[in-house]
Amino acid sequence: DAGITQSPRHKVTETGTPVTLRCHQTENHRYMYWYRQDPGHGLRLIHYSYGVKDTDKGEVSDGYSVSRSKTEDFLLTLESATSSQTSVYFCAISESLISSYEQYFGPGTRLTVT
Amino acid sequence: QKEVEQDPGPLSVPEGAIVSLNCTYSNSAFQYFMWYRQYSRKGPELLMYTYSSGNKEDGRFTAQVDKSSKYISLFIRDSQPSDSATYLCAMSGESGAGSYQLTFGKGTKLSVIP
C-alpha cells in the first residue's frame, strides 16, 4: 500500500462520540486525501491537504474536520459521530498537483456508528 | 445526472474471456481518465491512466477514451481469476480552484470463473 498506514483499521463507536482516524505516510508526498466509500455512492472526497496546515473541503465535508501538523500525518475527526457516517474511510496520497490522477490508497478503516 | 456513470454489475465471465468495462461522464473539463482496481477489503490501486483521448495498452489491459462521446472503456484480454475485483473509473481536470480532484464511478464488480 505504498507506505501508507491507517489506524485504527476497525472501530465501533456510539452516536455522539468524537472519533479520530489517522493516516500516516512514509513517501513524503505533499498531497493527502480522505475519502469515504459507501455502497451505491462509490468513493467520495471528504477533505484534502496540499501541505502542512493547508487543507480544503471536498464533496462531502459536513460533519468532518481534518488537521495536518506534519507532512506524514493527516487526521480525520468526526466531532460527534452519526449513524450516517458509518462507512469505510480511505486515505490517499499523491506526489504533486499535476500527478493527482495517480493516487495511492491506504488499506482503509471500517467505522461503524451505532 | 451524476458526473460519472458506471454500471455496478456484477459481471461474471469465464476464464479467458475478453472483458469490457465502461463509464460515461458529463463534465467536458475532465482531462485525465483512470482505471483503479480494488480487491475485496483492500484500497484501490491505479491500473492505468490516459490523458485526453486515445488508447493506451499495458499487457492484457487496454484503456480507451472517446471525449467526443464522453465515454471511456477498459478491456481485459485473456481474463484470469486473479482479475476478479471491483474496477473503478475515475476522472479529473482542472477545477476553478486549480485543483485536480478525482471523481469516481461507483465501480463494476467483476468475477472471472475458472
Image (spheres, coloured by chain):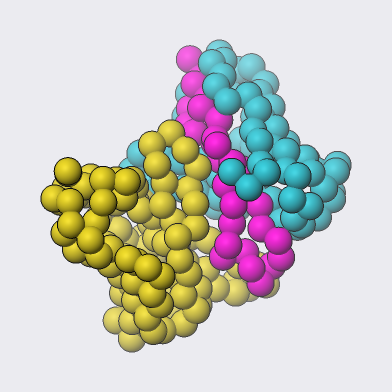
Residue sitting at x 60%, y 74%: B94
Residue sitting at x 54%, y 35%: A108
Residue sitting at x 65%, y 27%: A7
**Relative to A18, A13 lies left or right:** left
| Chain B drawn colour | yellow
The residues colored magenta run A85-114
Tell me if residue B104 can be seen: no
Residue B37 x/y as whole percent: 41, 52
For this orientation, the residue located farthest to the left is B14
Tell me if residue B98 can be seen: yes
Name the one closer to the observer, B90 or B49: B49
* Chain colored cyan: A
Q: The N terminus of chain B lies in which quarter of the figure?
A: bottom left
Name the one closer to the observer, A6 or B15: B15
Residue A23 x/y as whole percent: 69, 37
Q: Is residue A92 magenta?
A: yes
Total labels: the figure holds 0
Residue B21 x/y as whole percent: 26, 62
Q: Is residue B25 magenta?
A: no
Residue A70 x/y as whole percent: 85, 43
Vertical order, B4 against B40 (above or below): below
Vertical order, A14 against A93 (above or below): above
Q: Quadrant of residue A69?
A: top right
Vertical order, B31 against A96 (above or below): below
